[in-house]
Amino acid sequence: MFNQENTMKKNLFIGAGVVALLVLAAAGYWYMKAGDTTTPPEDGTTVIEGGENRIEFDDTLIEKVAHPPLDRTVAFSSTLPQDARTALETNIAKLVGQLEDDSENYGAWLDLALMYKTSGDYEGAVEIWEYIAQVVPGESVSYHNLGNYYHHEVEDFVTAESYFKQAIERNPGQSIHYQALFELYRYSYKTDTNLAEETLKEGISAVGNSIDLLISLGRFYKETGRTEEAKQTYLEVRSKAEAAGNENLVQSVDAELEGLY
């Protein structure tokens, strides 16, 4: 019912979807900026795993950890249409050029990882995320992306949990980290515990005015038959949406509430 489900779920963009994603990347639409404490977009905007261009690398660590090779032969998915592959090759070449000029361009590294992932070359994307996680202190985007990879692609839930928790530790103000860990507990791992609910509540407390996490909590209560708690949570969401002047969200909440009476 809601559009807040942009939570880095498994996506492989092909055809026109790839081209659209590349247009967004060129326009500078990123999933999350480092240090940003806002919630994900509420309008259905595609979530993209990118970041800001200027984030400080640790010079000492850079001397010890070699960056991924820039002459990588990309393992393109056989299902990619030729026009999509051509667009990806163009963007990859552009990003490689930027990194050859400035190997500490944080945004270019994350964009390149996104291009690899979109191409179907997860190994190349993971190599970049692991590198960034090592040389950029306090960075959380790469940890989130690695958690997402191990959750949805590898189905190594123990490793996914570890990465999501590290993302939260590094940036506790990002609601999307809690959302990802919640989904891991809700649908894949330790599903017989109350960790899913606890994770949402922890996120709501840490982030503050997190409408998306409240919506997830309301939906969780509804799906698990806790009707009264669902009502109260949705009413809280409605109040926040009304205060923010988000009429579309108010209408969506009203429709959800109708099903609870």
Image: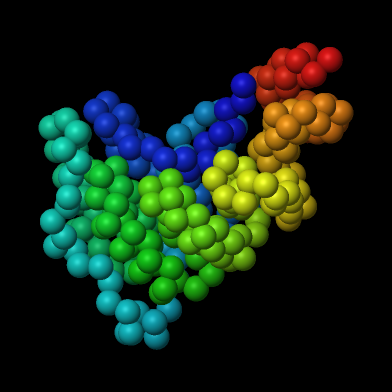
Asked whether the viewer can see residue 146, the reply is yes
Q: Is residue 239 above or below residue 100?
A: above
Left or right, 151 with respect to 129, comes to right
Left or right, 206 with respect to 42, comes to right
Residue drawn 39% across the image and 44% down it: 28
x, y percentage for residue 150? 43, 54
Residue drawn 52% across the image and 36% down it: 6
Quick one: quadrant of the N terminus? top right
x, y percentage for residue 154? 38, 52
Quick one: quadrant of the C terminus? top right
Q: Is residue 179 above or below residue 95?
A: above
Q: Residue furthest front?
A: 192
Residue drawn 21% across the image and 58% down it: 96
Left or right, 165 with respect to 72, comes to right
Q: Is residue 211 above or below residue 58?
A: above
Q: Quadrant of residue 166?
A: bottom right
Q: Is residue 23 above or below residue 33?
A: above
x, y percentage for residue 135? 41, 74
Decide which of 17, 156 is in the foreground and name it: 156
Asked whether the viewer can see residue 27, the reply is no
Colour scheme in the image? rainbow
Residue drawn 31% across the image and 34% down it: 13
x, y percentage for residue 217? 72, 38
Decide which of 20, 161 is in the foreground and name it: 161
Q: Quadrant of residue 210?
A: top right
Figure label count? 0
Q: Quadrant of residue 5?
A: top right
